[in-house]
Image (cartoon, rainbow, N blue to C red):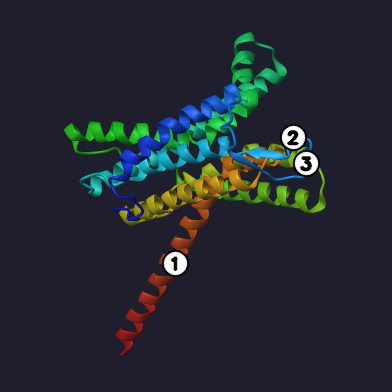
Amino acid sequence: MRSNLLFPHRLRAIGWLLTIPGLVLGYLTVYNDYKIPGFGMQLRKSSELFLPAYENFTNELALALVITGLLFIAFSKQKHEDELTAKIRLNALYWGILVNYACYGLFMALSLLNAYINIKGVEDVVDLFSDKFAFMIYNLFTPLIIFIGRFYYLLFKSKNEYTVSAVRFLPNKPYRLLGKILTVVLILIVAISAITNSNDDLSGDILYVLPFAMLLWVYSKEKQEDEYISSVRLSAMQIAVYANYIILIVSSVLVYGPDFILVMLINLSTIPAIFLLVFNYRLYKIKQEDGHEQKNNLTLGIL
């Protein structure tokens, strides 16, 4: 089980050189409202609500630096790539995504609790992560940070143990079917609301919970789980991460103001959504190939 979707090893050092200044610049941009002088252009004839006539691209630069750097750190080849490294990468990738959504779920639970029960400590935490959409901003890159931490921890640990624990999935039944049903139903509700231009609040609420329905599907076993399926999972998850961040970087350049808040909201679901599309498409192709092979074997047997 090896992945070919990796950057050259030398890009890992470049990743650190991009990430550190990107994080510093991002902090200054978000919390000190710093903007690089002259780093922008006139996009509109006059300023509109939440949309200035002159758009500065400092925050877009910071986001691009951090994401590109973290991708290089996370997915650059090790000096010695083998089956164990691939298993560690799969474990860390799934673990990173899951922990990130667990943190998101905790934040959502605290937000709901704070809405009904005014508890000082809870209110402070919710206010901290709600200020300037801090949690949604952190969510843009925390999956990569968690993955990197987990990956290098497991690499260090494997020097003595030479093994890595298998990724644990939910049983195929009933979680896989339940995840499918919930995902399809929620997406249909959002689509109908968008087409009919009705109940935007409901659509927004659904987008907040949609990732959890998808995760039931993502983290449920196939009927037959083996090494080959694991390799398909690894490549599908890497493609999902790459595609997610490419879309995010492009969106940060093309989308501004309140519309980018919608981008960040949709971003909560893009990794599991892209994974499910890629993974299930590849499973479909595998089944097709197996079917053709069985048919050919049957034909040869008859002959």
Which is nearer the N-term, disc 2 or disc 1?
2
Q: Secondary structure at mark 1?
A: helix
Q: Amino acid at mark 1?
A: Lys
Which is nearer the N-term, disc 3 or disc 2?
2
Q: Amino acid at mark 2?
A: Phe
Q: Residue at 66%, 20% (x, y): give it.
A: 113
Q: Which one is in front, 213 or 139? A: 139
Q: Position of residue 183 (x, y in %)?
A: 61, 48
Q: Residue at 73%, 37% (x, y): give it.
A: 52
Cβ–Cβ under 8 Å for marks 1 and 3: no
Q: Which one is in front, 64 or 125? A: 64
Instruction: Look at mark 1 in the image and give the residue it sits on.
Output: 285
Instruction: Look at mark 3 in the image and give the residue it sits on.
Output: 200
Is 60 placed above or below 225 here?
A: above
Q: Position of residue 46 (x, y in %)?
A: 79, 41
Instruction: Look at mark 2 in the image and give the residue it sits on.
Output: 50
Q: Rounded to the nearest whole Å, what is the CA distance between mark 2 and mark 1? A: 47 Å
Task: Locate residue 128 relative to residue 286 in the image: left or right.
Answer: right
Task: Locate residue 208 relative to residue 68 in the image: left or right.
Answer: right
Q: Position of residue 262 (x, y in %)?
A: 67, 41
Q: Amino acid at mark 3?
A: Asp
Which is nearer the N-term, disc 1 or disc 3?
3
Extreme residue in the bottom direction: 303
Is 52 placed above or below 106 here?
A: below
Q: Rounded to the nearest whole Å, what is the CA distance between mark 3 and mark 2? A: 20 Å
